[in-house]
Amino acid sequence: MDSYIQIIVFFAILFSVFGFIQWYVIRSYIRWLARTVSAHEFHRFRAAGLIIFAFANILFILRFPSTELGWYQHPLFQALVIYPGGIFFGAVVLAFLALLLINGSTALVRVFRLLPWSPSNSVTETGTPVTNIGTPATSTGTPATNIGTPAIGHTVAVQPASDRPFTNSIVPSVSGLSRRQFLRTAGTAMITAPVALTIGASAATAHDYQINKLRLHYPGLPSGLNGLRIVQLSDIHSGIYMTEQQMRDIFHLVNEQQPDLVAITGDFVDNSPSEIPALYRAIADLKAEYGVFGCLGNHDHYASAPMVSSALRQQGVQVLTNGSRTLRINGESLTLLGVDDIESGSTNTARMDQAAQWLPQDGFRVLLSHRPDLFDDARNRGVDLTLSGHTHGGQIGFEVMGVPFYPIHLFHDYAKGLYEIGEHKLYVNVGIGMVGVPVRLVRPELTVIELTNRA
């Protein structure tokens, strides 16, 4: 019963927050229309906008039962429901953030103008006309009249600032454009930009898999392990953005790398037991000479950790849950350790002590940990290589002229890629799947790691 309560609470929070975001965006849209179009056009465009939002919400909501019913597996349903619904979600959230930034800037400008030292407060508003000092005299010597200054006693109608959603204070003077034209142009850009960005980001890299090849140098690597090839996958997320056929394509790419062993570092499924059968069928394609190994991630617990583990083991995947397995390769010892997700909320949480209690004194040691946070503990225990995932590289990030902009670095000490401390190494795989929205500016990856003792 607890799991059902958790599901109800999750969806209540999700739809409440997303509902508020949509209300804010729609409200801003309607206020923008009121400032930029005629009364006839206003009613027409408002109705069109509300209809689009209502239809998009239907697509967004349909994603949830489609997981349980298996509809998401069909390409047509993917094209007409899953991806449009996901892009709608992403675009609305992006528009909301942009509006917060714009409206926040406007509020700061207004506050600044109320401050005593603000230039706008330097003129005393007494109701008396201010003498136009320095006005050139006419040819008769009489001061020129300040044309356009209201006469004393006349009332000038000024629209209150609180009634102006897009205040004049931040609307620049644009040569050749009226204020209404400027607002119309800017607002149109605001509407189209979030949609275009999410569609472009989804189409560009969502399934543009990159194969990252690394040669990791260990001077003390046993000679029998020299050239050993490990292929790492992480964060598959079997579900609405990762169908059975897509998984088969990925596993085919893995097999093409001719791995000696395969390591999968958690989040095999997204969040539902109904996503396990597709994974079960597809992962049978995965082959490696010394086996396929894995550890569980937090999303595997959201679904059902026992069911995910059972399905994987039935297909020959060796799930390491706070345990280890030692292989003999070319006469040398290679020990694989695996820990459960450290923040899953399960009673079977990560226990490095349990996983490391039967470690042999010699040989090479590899830890599989969904989250990279255990790297410091692992290297202190003599683990040579830690493989992790979880972060997705943030899914959103990019580089400009070689300068990286990855917000995920604000939340994780070990966010993406290779880290080295002494002879101990950590690789954080950015994942092959997606979560939340079908957008990845950080390209999905599979990693080919070759161990070597040669410089």
Image (cartoon, rainbow, N blue to C red):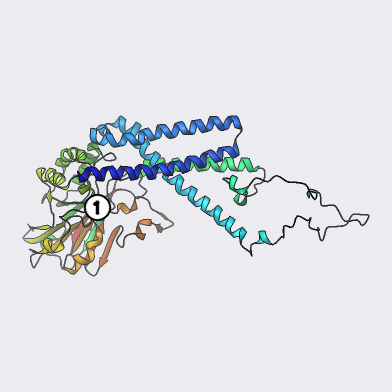
Q: Rate crowding at label 1 as few (under 14), some (14 to 19) or many (20 or more) other CA atoms within 10 Å.
A: many
**Residue of label 1:** 447
Residue 301 is situated, as x and y percent measured from the top left of the image, at 20, 48
One can see residue 237 in this view: no
- Provide residue 420's location: percent of width, then percent of height: 26, 65
Q: Quadrant of residue 217?
A: bottom left
When asked about the image quadrant of residue 337, the answer is bottom left
* Figure check: 294 above or below 381: above
Which residue is at 23% across, 33% downward?
70
Whether residue 317 is situated above or below residue 354 in the rendered picture? above
Nearest the viewer among 222 and 129 is 129
Asked if residue 277 is positioned above or below residue 401 in the image, the reply reads: above
Return the x and y of residue 17 as percentages of the image width and height.
38, 45
Image x and y of residue 394, in percent: 34, 53
Answer whether residue 176 is visible to the viewer in this image.
yes
Q: Is 348 situated left or right of 178 in this image?
A: left
Q: Nearer the viewer, residue 43 or 440?
A: 43
251 or 436: nearer the eye? Answer: 436
| Residue 202 relative to residue 170: left or right | left
Tell me the quadrant of the picture where the N terminus can be found: top left
Of the pair 293 and 371, the residue shown nearer to us: 371
* Element at label 1: strand
- Total tally of numbered discs in the picture: 1
The structure residue drawn at horizontal position 31% and vertical position 63%, both measured from the top left corner, is 413
Report whether 337 appears left or right of 270.
left
Residue type pointed to by label 1: Thr
Tell me the quarter of the image containing the C terminus. Answer: bottom left
